[in-house]
Amino acid sequence: MEELKKQFRNCLENNILNYWLTKVIDNEHGGYYGRVDGHDKVHSEAEKGAILNARILWAFSAAYRVLKKPEYLKAAERARDYIFDHFIDKENGGVYWSVDYKGNPQDTKKQTYAIGFTIYGMSEFARATGDRSALDCAVRLFHDIERHAYDSKNNGYIEALTRDWQPIADMRLSDKDENGSRTMNTHLHIIEPYTNLLRVLKGDHHDSLTLTDEEKTTLKAEVEHATRNLLDIFTDIILNKETYHLDLFFNDEWQGKRNIQSFGHDIEASWLLHETALVLGDKATIDRIEPLVRYIADAADEGLQPDGSTIYEKWLDDGHEDRQRQWWVMCESVIGHANLYEHFGSAKALGKCIRAWDYIRKYLIDNENGEWHWARLDDGTINLDDDKAGFWKCPYHNSRMCLEIMQRDI
């Protein structure tokens, strides 16, 4: 396994992070470029997304925490400072969805998903460095979500609001999504940063965080309460008890079509929900969640192919499948199956993990130019229409995959 971990570290440092350090830094206008297309052409005047910048912050913070290389700290600081200076709405709270290439607010809506990722990045920077300003930012954004996006009547989190937290007609993350006021994806990426923030608050990572005992106790209680509630939302509402897939789109009352199966989100949720239970730490929660971890992972494997790849989605209405092998789905397949091996001793899962990694190395990693292609199409050709770096193509899923394997007891 040590040789396998060396492969992941080499991929992380020489293929992924090096690409972002040499190709994506915007030395003219600050921060990072908003887009590099599938042909490796930099679009220097592309708008810059909050999700991209928050994920860059997370990736370099986590890499610095594990590897302690100064260049990773510098890259993380660059992302942190750019978010502070350009994405944080200092008047209303929250973060803007996007800014233009010069850093001016462009789309000022408050997408809960993007605020969640900013919490994720800031809490990871605090975890890695002990930086109090990043922790304070994460806590403020947590309170922004709880104050404005939490629906106490129906439970759960509103998908999006206007700049000043009023209702908004179009709540979609992207034009590929349904316009639901509740989505699985946003809730998954709220529980993920809340779990990371709770991990920081529960730990004694850095004396420089200088939280008083009273501050820490109060914050821990608030974040833990919200995190436990999110876990209940997943197990009681979002999880389809008949199929053990996660259903995707809902209205305010949590009514939805339950007609799409997203195999990448399923396998991602299998280990993220397990991680939440482990961070919460009590035996009752772990015992309740661990059987579901395996059921959800088994449902995700319905998209698994003989060559180790996993297709993207299936629509139950007509049986149509999106058979792209997308980069992020493959990353989550690696982690999810490694999690089953580490915690449940499944040798079969380890085999699936290794076959997924072999597929990635053979078909998705761009060994010539760096980083990964967006996807392979079902006919085996490379998807060059989608980005190498952009709103949704960030050093997050693949960096996290490498770091997870490097740190796990496998």
Image: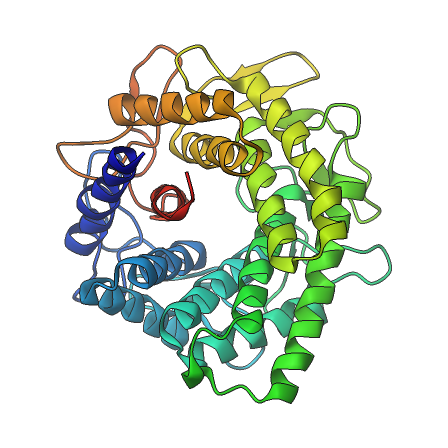
Residue occupying image coordinates x 12% and y 32%? 368
Q: Quadrant of the N terminus?
A: top left
Q: Quadrant of residue 376?
A: top left
Q: Quadrant of residue 82?
A: bottom left
Q: Looking at this view, is 115 or 6 the one in front?
A: 6
Does residue 406 appear left or right of residue 282 in this picture? left
Residue occupying image coordinates x 78% and y 61%? 151
Spot occupied by residue 172 in the image (x, y as percentages of width and height)? 60, 46
Residue 171 visible in the displayed image: no
Spot occupied by residue 13 in the image (x, y as percentages of width and height)? 21, 48
Q: Looking at this view, is 3 or 259 the one in front?
A: 3
Above or below: residue 343 compared with residue 263: below
Above or below: residue 27 compared with residue 186: below
Residue 51 visible in the displayed image: yes
Residue occupying image coordinates x 60% and y 61%? 194
Q: Quadrant of residue 84?
A: bottom left
Spot occupied by residue 341 in the image (x, y as percentages of width and height)? 50, 32
Count how many numbered circles sit on residues in the image. 0
Q: Looking at this view, is 135 or 20 the one in front?
A: 135
Residue occupying image coordinates x 34% and y 43%? 402
Does residue 330 appear left or right of residue 277 in this picture? left
Above or below: residue 275 compared with residue 369: below
